[in-house]
Amino acid sequence: MDIRPDPGLEALLFLDGESFVADTAGRLWVKFDVRRVEASASRPHGLKYSLTLHNEEGVRVLGFDNAHPVREGSGPGVRTRVEYDHKHQGKRIRFYDYEDAATLLSDFWREVEQILQERSL
């Protein structure tokens, strides 16, 4: 399976194993787990990743990952995809359209910022 060149990939891989405090009060934190894997139908970009935001109790508030297959919806309208890319927000799981590493990071940080703004109100 061909992997397209991805100029932001090294920056994403550099974050593997890192955790950061995400808010000034120190109540929210992010964690990155990223590694190269063999490209496959479920991970066509050759990455296994988990980018997560956690609250002070360690509960995941937001997550972008491709750790497992996802079914979206229920009943006769349920949808599944071969690609594992998805995001968690609370108990909701939605498909995520992976473009490249830089877009993944940008999308993740944008949603982290939105959650931080909502919590500061």
Image: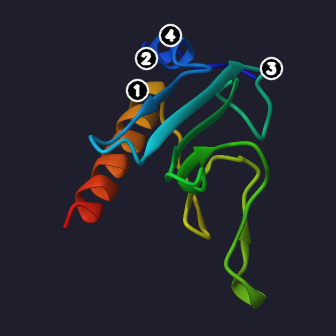
Identify the mark nearer the N-term, 3 or 1: 3
Identify the mark nearer the N-term, 2 or 3: 2
The answer to whether marks 2 and 4 mark residues whose Cβ atoms lie closer than 8 Å is: yes
Identify the mark nearer the N-term, 3 or 4: 4
Return the residue at label 4: 10
Return the residue at label 2: 8
Q: Amino acid at mark 4?
A: Glu
**Front tag of 3 and 4:** 4
Return the residue at label 3: 38
Q: Residue at x 22, y 60 (%)?
A: 120
- The kind of secondary structure element at disc 1 is helix
Mark pair 2, 4: CA separation: 6 Å
Of the pair 30 and 15, the residue shown nearer to us: 30
**Image spot of residue 47 (x, y percent):** 68, 26
Q: Where is 93 relative to 23, above or below?
A: below
Identify the mark nearer the N-term, 1 or 4: 4
Q: Is residue 44 left or right of residue 118?
A: right
Mark pair 3, 4: CA separation: 16 Å
- The kind of secondary structure element at disc 4 is helix
Q: Amino acid at mark 3?
A: Glu
Return the residue at label 1: 102
Q: Residue at x 42, y 42 (%)?
A: 108
**Image spot of residue 3 (x, y percent):** 64, 19
Quarter of image, res 44? top right
